Amino acid sequence: MMQQVYEDKWSEVFDRPSADLIEVRWFDSTAEMSAGDFQSWLTKFAESVEKSGRSRVLVDSTAFRMSPAKMDGPWRDANIIPRYNAAGVRKFAFLMPDGMPMIGEPPANEGPGRFPTGYFGRRQDALDWLAG
């Protein structure tokens, strides 16, 4: 069973206890998202991960529209990834739009993450990897 635990103008977050999974589905309204909005949202999501106790995370980025230039990787590495590590995240998957170059690369740990991150073009492929 899946339960919505959060929604705002940017996304919705679901807890899927039977799959030990927390899932984000981004909305195309993210085209209007600022760097500050994104950091604020990541902070809220880290809280959801901590509260859920799930070890698997799925981020559906197929409708994500914010410019990657607004992302601050070092800030995320310093402020968000340690929270995922402490919460016990073991696998992190991104469902990406067609044509993204990371799709299909072997999942690997990124930055300070103590968990592998995978990039997938098909939802079922992401779910299969997360469940394995």
Image (cartoon, helix red, strand yellow):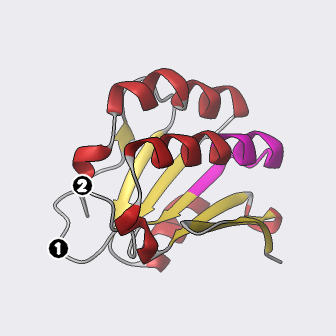
Position in image of residue 66 (x %, y %):
33, 60
The residue depicted at 69 percent of the width and 34 percent of the height is 88
Q: Which residues are magenta?
A: 46-57
In the image, which is nearer the foreground, mark 1 or mark 2? Answer: 1
On the image, numbered disc 2 is attached to which residue? 105
On the image, numbered disc 1 is attached to which residue? 99
Position in image of residue 55 (x %, y %):
68, 46
Closer-to-camera residue (64/86): 64
Closer-to-camera residue (128/25): 25
| Mark 1 vs mark 2, CA separation in Å | 13 Å
The residue depicted at 33 percent of the width and 42 percent of the height is 71
> In this orientation, does residue 93 appear?
yes
Q: Earlier in the sequence, mark 1 or mark 2?
A: 1
What's the amino acid at mark 1?
Answer: Gly
Task: State the quadrant of the N terminus.
Answer: bottom right
Is residue 112 one of those drawn in magenta? no
